[in-house]
Image (tube, rainbow, N blue to C red):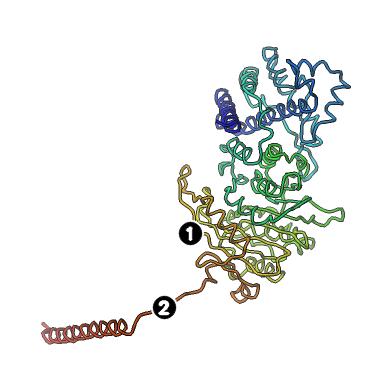
Amino acid sequence: MTTAVAFETQTKTLIDDLKSVCANYGLGNDGNEFKIITQVFLYKFLNDKFVYEVKQIDTEIANAKDWEAKLRSYSDEDFEMLTFQLNESTAVLKPAQFITSLHQKQNDPKFAELFDNTLLGIAEANSSIFSVITNGGEKIVLFENLSKYVTDDRDGFCRAIINKLTAFSFEHIFSEKFDFYAGIFEYLIKDYNTNSGGKYAEYFTPHAVAKIMARCLVKGEVTNASCYDPSAGSGTLLMNLAHQIGEEKCSIYSQDISQKSSNLLRLNLVLNNLVHSIPNIVKGNTILEPFHKEKSGALQKFDYIVSNPPFKLDFSDYSEDLDSKENQERFFAGIPKIPKKKKESMAIYLLFLQHIMHSLEDKNGKAAIVVPTGFITAQSGIDKKIRQKMVESKMLAGVVSMPSNIFATTGTNVSILFLDKSNKGDVVLIDASNLGETIKEGKNQKTVLTETEEEHIISVFNNKEAEDDFSVVVSYDDIKAKNYSLSAGQYFEVKIEYVDITAEEFATKMKGFESNLENLFAESKSLEKEIQENLKMLKYE
């Protein structure tokens, strides 16, 4: 077993153990369990990361038989000098805030209070780098008072938690990369990132979709890129995009109306060495109050935008507020009408699409957006106006129509829309709807692409290849001629296959046709005669 696999197993066991503790104290399937599990895991990760980084900087501590005793012997001034050398992605902890320190004091009276104050102290000391902000400027810090969610024996609960955190150290896995942490993150939140959370539930964008979006957007070397998601959720799309560019070569920006998803994204950024972007993570309503702006007040423009926006979300409470002069340019195609019934069917994604187009960097901005497949062929309304703008502004790069049930949580067929402000040439349309294999995920059916199929889609898109019944390469004029349809199937050629045969084979076939016709005609005459005779026998009684 490799080191990475061993630590992945240990990490998943830790997560299961924390869930077991919560269950034993009456928090199993409780809405607050999510907060406890994710925050305790983050405390463990930051604690071990601090220890790891300190040992990298100070060889005396690294080589000491008791590294903690050596560190505690430092004066306040020496300790502060040591922390100044830390990478900005490393949270600063004091020795009294270490997991080992709490473990040693677990039998102290009011241990729950000590536990909570320790986490709150870490959050306050590191708030300038690790806080998510709201539209109104309020800071959402790393940790909160966790023992308050337990009604009985809070000291016992906190003791059980701290004992689980001492089983092993993360120190040996900080050299691991994106793929390792992506699996850990998904396992950590798999029970909390479902549609059971109500109207603002976050969904995992399937890895195949996220991978295709990132690989088709990022080509060649990229530096100093701004990457944005206006409906970020837990950050799957942004993490894949950042990994494709290089975490040190980009800055992440996001906004999401859900505090839960903003906290998840922060955790994802910490795990994936993107702490420098945490101050750009905003909890707020992107459509009503977009946060990221230039000093002039204009919306900030981004190099890359990825998004899996909500398809159905009630925005009736603030729809009238969107119809303002300052929003006319942003929502150029209009604001979807509020249906009298089924408010949850509102096409809010049309607002996100227009917002994304407006937020793209003017010269080379690129975007990938998940849309309902119905959007790419709608023949009227806002849908068509948006497609028309994409074509006439020459910013459309292509479309990939995905298999049905690529999302296990929704039956809506989806396509990935690719925009590229620098694409003045041909457009690639791919119909991947027949790919993948169906598997069962819980009660739902899900379609999963193989790695070979993923690579095939990416290769065909990036190389602008035309394949029979799979992909076409069309011009902007071709799309205009098809009434701005972006469905690959409407551009496939209808082919008639011709087979070469000899004169003798042709004569034989014709003879066979003549013989069959003669037999059919003879049978027809016989039936005609029989019907006439039967009619003569009919009498009125």
Q: Secondary structure at mark 2?
A: loop
Q: The N terminus is located in which quarter?
A: top right
Q: Which residue does the numbered mark 2 point to in the structure image?
A: 498
Question: Residue at the spot x=57%, y=29% of the render?
Answer: 6
Residue type for callout 1: Asn
Where is 431 relative to 154, above or below? below
Q: Residue furthest right?
A: 77
The picture places residue 530, in percent across and down from the top left corner, at 14, 84
| Observer-nearest of 169 and 411 | 169
**Residue depth check, mark 1 versus mark 2: number of the one nearer the observer:** 2
- Residue 274 drawn above or below residue 45: below
Question: Which label belongs to residue 100?
Answer: none
Identify residue for label 1.
434
Residue type, numbered disc 2:
Tyr
Q: Is residue 218 above or below residue 172?
A: below
Q: Is residue 231 left or right of residue 2?
A: right
Toward the viewer: 6 or 285?
Answer: 6
Q: Quadrant of residue 157?
A: top right
- In the image, residue 245 lies at what x, y percent? 71, 49
Left/right placement of residue 510 relative to residue 173 reads left
